[in-house]
C-alpha cells in the first residue's frame, strides 16, 4: 500500500472511530459539550495549518503559471473558458437540487419538529450579499490584508496582475519568477508534512460533533439527509458524465486522483483543506500546473457545485416545512438569484447558511426555518465540501483539455516537481 492510499485509509479509520468515540462521549460524559469544545481545538489547529499554506501556495503557483504563459490574451481566454464551464455547472447543480427537492418533498411533515425546535440560537447576517460587498471581496485594498484573511479571490486577482506584469517585464523578472517557483515547491512539500495530521484531525472533528449533538440528530433528520446525500451522489454521476464527454476514459483516472482530497474535504467538512492535495492530483493526471494553478483557485470562488445544489434543496425544504407552496416561476427566479448570490460565498463563514438566509428573506419565507438545518449542517457540509472538490477537479481538467494542456499522466514521484 503506497503512502497516499495509507493516508486515505487512516482518514476513513479516523472517521469511523470518531463516530464511535463521539457516541460513547455523548452517552457517558457529564458534560459532553465541554469535551467537544476542547476536542475541536485539534481540528481547528489542523485547519489553521492548512490555511497558512493556501495563500502562499495560490500566489506562487498562479504567478509562475501566468508568467510562463507570457501572453495576457491567453490568460483571458482560459479565464473565459473556465467561467463558461462554471456557469453551466452551476445551472446543472441548482436545477438538480430544485428538481429533487420537489420530487422528494422532504419538508412535508416537518412542522412538528420546527415548532419544537424554537427560534434559531444565532442570527445570520445577510449583508454580505450586496454588489458593494462583492466588489470589496473581489479586489484587495492591500494584498497583505487579503493574504492575512485568506481571501482566495483577492489573492487570485492580485496574482493575475502580478504574473501578467512579470511576463511583460521579461528577462529582468526571470530571477524573481524562479524564486516564486521555489516557494511553490516548498509549499507543496510543506503540504505533505501537514497532511500527516489529517487522520487525527478527522477523528477529533467527528468525535466532537457526535459528542455534542448525539447520533439521535441523524435519526430525526434521516429522511432529509438520506435524500440530500442521494442528490449529491447523483450530482457526482452527472459531473463524471460531463467529464467523460470531454475527457473520455481519463475521467476515471481523474476521479481516482480526487479520491483522497474528496475524503479529506468530506471528513473535515472543508473543501479548503483539500486544496493542496487537489492541485497535486490534477498535476498527476497530466494537467499542466499553469492551468491548474489558475483555474482551481477561481473555482473555489465561482464553482461550488455542492454548495449551490444545497441552497436550492434547503430553501425549498424550509418552505415545505412551513406549508408554503412556491410556484414554478418563483422557484426559477429563486434559482437565478442563487446563481448570482452564491458567487459571493468565498471567505464568508457558514456561507451556505448565509446565502439561504438571504434567499428566505427575499422570498418571504420565515428565516426561523434555518433552525431545521443548524443541528445537522455539519453533516450536510461534509457532503457538499467533497462535491465542491470533485466539481472543481473536473472543471480544471476540462479547461486543460480545451486548451490542449492535458499531457500524459506523471509518475507519482515526479508529480510535485512538475511546476512549469
Image (cartoon, rainbow, N blue to C red):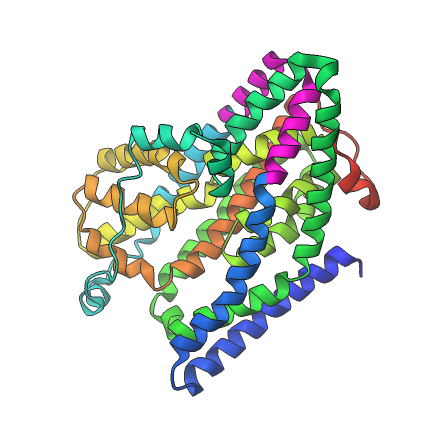
How many numbered tags mark residues here?
A: 0
Looking at the picture, how far across and down is residue 67, in whole percent? 67, 21
Choose top left, top right, bottom left or bottom right for residue 131. Answer: top left
Question: What residue lies at 54% left-to-right and 54% top-to-bottom?
Answer: 48
Give the side of residue 57 with respect to residue 386, left or right: right
Looking at the picture, how far across and down is residue 358, in whole percent? 26, 42
Give the side of residue 364 with respect to residue 201, left or right: left
Is residue 335 positioned above or below 209 on the image?
above
Choose top left, top right, bottom left or bottom right for residue 9. Answer: bottom right
Q: Is residue 171 magenta?
A: no
- Specify start and end residues of the magenta stretch as a single range: 56-83
| Residue 247 or residue 84, whichever sits in front | 84
Q: Is residue 194 visible?
A: yes
Q: Is residue 63 magenta?
A: yes
| Residue 55 or residue 348, whichever sits in front | 55
Quarter the N terminus occupies: bottom right
Question: What residue lies at 26% left-to-right and 55% top-to-bottom?
Answer: 370
Q: Is residue 215 visible?
A: no
Is residue 79 positioned above or below 5 on the image?
above
Quarter the C terminus occupies: top right
Give the side of residue 359 with respect to residue 285, left or right: left
Looking at the picture, how far across and down is residue 65, in whole percent? 67, 26
| Residue 140 or residue 210, whichever sits in front | 140
Looking at the picture, how far across and down is residue 408, in whole percent? 79, 32
Is residue 249 positioned above or below 24 on the image?
above
Give the side of residue 396 with respect to residue 414, left or right: left
Question: What residue lies at 51% left-to-right and 52% top-to-bottom?
Answer: 270
What secondary structure do most residues of the magenta stretch adopt?
Answer: helix
Is residue 133 positioned above or below 281 on the image?
above
Amino acid at each position: 500500500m503506497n503512502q497516499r492510499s495509507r493516508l486515505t485509509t487512516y482518514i476513513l479509520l479516523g472517521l469511523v472511530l470518531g463516530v464511535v468515540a463521539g457516541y460513547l462521549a455523548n452517552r457517558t460524559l457529564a458534560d459532553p459539550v465541554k469535551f467537544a469544545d476542547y476536542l475541536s481545538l485539534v481540528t481547528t489547529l489542523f485547519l489553521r495549518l492548512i490555511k497558512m499554506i493556501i495563500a502562499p501556495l495560490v500566489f506562487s503557483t498562479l504567478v509562475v503559471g501566468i508568467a510562463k504563459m507570457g501572453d495576457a490574451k491567453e490568460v483571458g481566454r482560459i479565464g473565459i473558458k473556465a467561467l463558461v464551464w462554471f456557469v453551466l455547472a452551476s445551472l446543472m447543480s441548482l436545477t438538480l437540487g430544485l428538481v429533487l427537492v420537489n420530487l422528494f418533498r422532504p419538508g412535508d411533515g416537518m412542522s412538528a419538529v420546527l415548532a419544537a425546535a424554537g427560534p434559531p440560537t444565532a442570527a445570520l447576517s445577510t449583508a454580505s450579499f450586496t454588489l458593494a460587498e462583492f466588489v470589496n471581496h473581489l479586489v484587495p485594498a492591500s494584498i497583505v490584508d487579503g493574504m492575512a484573511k485568506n481571501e482566495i479571490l483577492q489573492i487570485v486577482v492580485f496574482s493575475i496582475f502580478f504574473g501578467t506584469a512579470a511576463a511583460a517585464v521579461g528577462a529582468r523578472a526571470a530571477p524573481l519568477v524562479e524564486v516564486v517557483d521555489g516557494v511553490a515547491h516548498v509549499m507543496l512539500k510543506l503540504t505533505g508534512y501537514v497532511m500527516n495530521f489529517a487522520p487525527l484531525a478527522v477523528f477529533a472533528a467527528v468525535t466532537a460533533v457526535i459528542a455534542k449533538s448525539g447520533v439521535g440528530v441523524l435519526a430525526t433528520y434521516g429522511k432529509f439527509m438520506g435524500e440530500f446525500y442521494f442528490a449529491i451522489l447523483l450530482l457526482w454521476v452527472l459531473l463524471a458524465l460531463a467529464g467523460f464527454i470531454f475527457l473520455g476514459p481519463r475521467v476515471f483516472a481523474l476521479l481516482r486522483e480526487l479520491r483522497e482530497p474528496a475524503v479529506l474535504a468530506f471528513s473535515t467538512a472543508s473543501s479548503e483543506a483539500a486544496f493542496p492535495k487537489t492541485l497535486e492530483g490534477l498535476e498527476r493526471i497530466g494537467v499542466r500546473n499553469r492551468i491548474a494553478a489558475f483555474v482551481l483557485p477561481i473555482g473555489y470562488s465561482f464553482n461550488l457545485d455542492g454548495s449551490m445544489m444545497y441552497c436550492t434543496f434547503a430553501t425549498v425544504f424550509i418552505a415545505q416545512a412551513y406549508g408554503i407552496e412556491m410556484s414554478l416561476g418563483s422557484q426559477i427566479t429563486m434559482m437565478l438569484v442563487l446563481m448570482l448570490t452564491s458567487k459571493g460565498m468565498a471567505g464568508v463563514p457558514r456561507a451556505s447558511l448565509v446565502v439561504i438566509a438571504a434567499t428566505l428573506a427575499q422570498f418571504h419565507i420565515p428565516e426561523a426555518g434555518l433552525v431545521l438545518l443548524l443541528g445537522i449542517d455539519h453533516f450536510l457540509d461534509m457532503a457538499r465540501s467533497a462535491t465542491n472538490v470533485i466539481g472543481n477537479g473536473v472543471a480544471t481538467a476540462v479547461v486543460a483539455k480545451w486548451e490542449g494542456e492535458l499531457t500524459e499522466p506523471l509518475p507519482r514521484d515526479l508529480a510535485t516537481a512538475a511546476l512549469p
